[in-house]
Amino acid sequence: MTAVGSERRTIRVTVNGTLYEREVEARLLLSDFLRHELGLTGTHVGCEHGVCGACTVLLDGEPVRSCLLFAVQVDGHAIETVEGLAPRDGELHRLQRAFWEKHGLQCGYCTPGMLMVLKAFLAEHPDPTEEEIREAISGNLCRCTGYQNIVEAARYAAQLLRSSGRVVEANHADPLLR
Amino acid sequence: MKPPRFRYTAPERLDEALAVLAELGDEAKPLAGGQSLVPMLNMRLARPSVLVDLNRIPELDGIELVDGYLRIRAMTRHRAVERSSVVAQHQPLLSEAIRYVGHLPIRTRGTVGGSITHADPAAELPGVLLALDGAVELLSQRGERVVPAAEFFVDLLTTVAAPDELVTAVRFPVLPPNSGTAWLEVARRHGDYALVGVGAVVTIASDGRTIEEARLSFIGVSVTPVRARAAEAALRGQPVAPDTWRAAAVAVREDLDPTSDIHASAAYRRSVAGVLAERALALAAQRAQEGIER
């Protein structure tokens, strides 16, 4: 009898628009694949059992826990990580800008997960209530307990995204901001 | 927190998956959404030799309305159920409860079949299935069988499914006429496992004022989801009125026998179960009456 399945596989995955081909162990978590194989360390690893949400990435546009997926499972799929948010070097995505301006990060550990889940959420809910925002980030833990500013940042990000990036508060002279 | 070594196979056809399970039995573990299994692997609480990934089998995905029930195939994501207008229209209890399953990034991966098979006593979908007297479709190389919800869940994280059997679909009956439903639960945070949850189904007689049938299904109060059968029996023929719901809360507390754990004491769970039952019955009856008036 030949053994069923294999311990290693070659996969092709598109991450932030770039196609990667790697041979990986079947047990390699997607979070470790992103960080160790591709060097994309923006995706943070907190609890590694699906509770903290720090490792949230987008799989074909939907937010998922990358610690609860094996890299072999995303063969042929598209992943977006926090590194894919900014349009170019020196320029922030509007979500990132909102977090910066509203002090939506303290230590920054939960931030990549917060940004990725909010990116998907705000695409579907362009004008959310505070309660809806709190529910959307309920699966993401901030151990600094800075939820107030995260919620405020999410509301501001929604405003920025709705206004197509036009300045909605007239106090931005910084050329890095758009 | 890294999973142990395993061999991995991702069949594209159902019969291939069944062949692996028939050959390997409990050496193999089917991988659905992985939102419970992968944590168990990461913590090395599970050590299967082979993971059979079901995510590339199109036959296992989809929602259809057939013969009085919603047939939801096993690999249908929670998120798809949440977004489904067919589910919202035909099975409001499922539609309401699904939003309490984990968090958004859990529901995008988690599956209906996975939740039912995992049989967590605090999970919503087993409680919904039991409230609706639904059924589970099991398939193996030995054949197919359909098991009623009341027989499917046998113990903590344990169902009647044999190691070579796959849950291929779950049947959620549509509501009888003049019926309303409600799902309520108490959890520390939205999306956490419920300390106590209840699904209520109330069918009102054609006079619009008497209860024809009421069902109460609880999660978080036992090793499996449970019905409060004595309380249900006492509700039959009673008037649709606040006193009836209050009496039901008392009966529920006598029906249930919850245990204490780190999250809540037995006394607290019993108390909350009564309160939630009272509210859920009132809400379900109100929705049933609104349906009749419409």
Image (cartoon, rainbow, N blue to C red):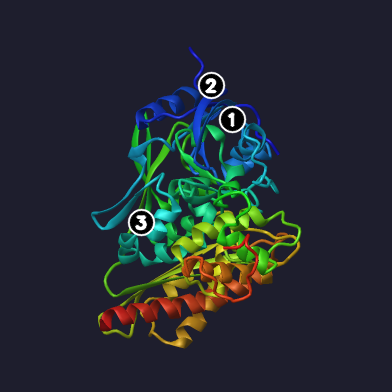
Instruction: Report how far apart the C-alphas of labels 3 and 2 lie in the structure.
Output: 37 Å
Q: Position of residue B118 (x, y in %)?
A: 53, 46
Q: Residue at x 47, y 41 (%)?
A: A78
Image disc number at residue B48: 1
Q: State the residue lying farthest toward the left.
A: B67
User: How many residues crowd mark 1 within 10 Å: few (<14), some (14–19), many (20+)?
Assistant: some
Instruction: Report how far apart the C-alphas of labels 2 and 1 lie in the structure.
Output: 13 Å
Q: Residue at x 49, y 49 (%)?
A: B110
Q: Amino acid at mark 3?
A: Phe
In the rendered image, the quadrant that contains the C terminus of chain B is bottom left
The mark total stands at 3
Instruction: Report how far apart the C-alphas of labels 3 and 1 lie in the structure.
Output: 31 Å
Q: Which image quadrant is residue A141 in?
A: bottom right
Image disc number at residue B172: 3
Q: Is residue B111 left or right of residue A88?
A: left
Query: Which residue is under mark 2?
Result: A6
Tell me the element at label 2: loop
Q: Amino acid at mark 1?
A: Pro
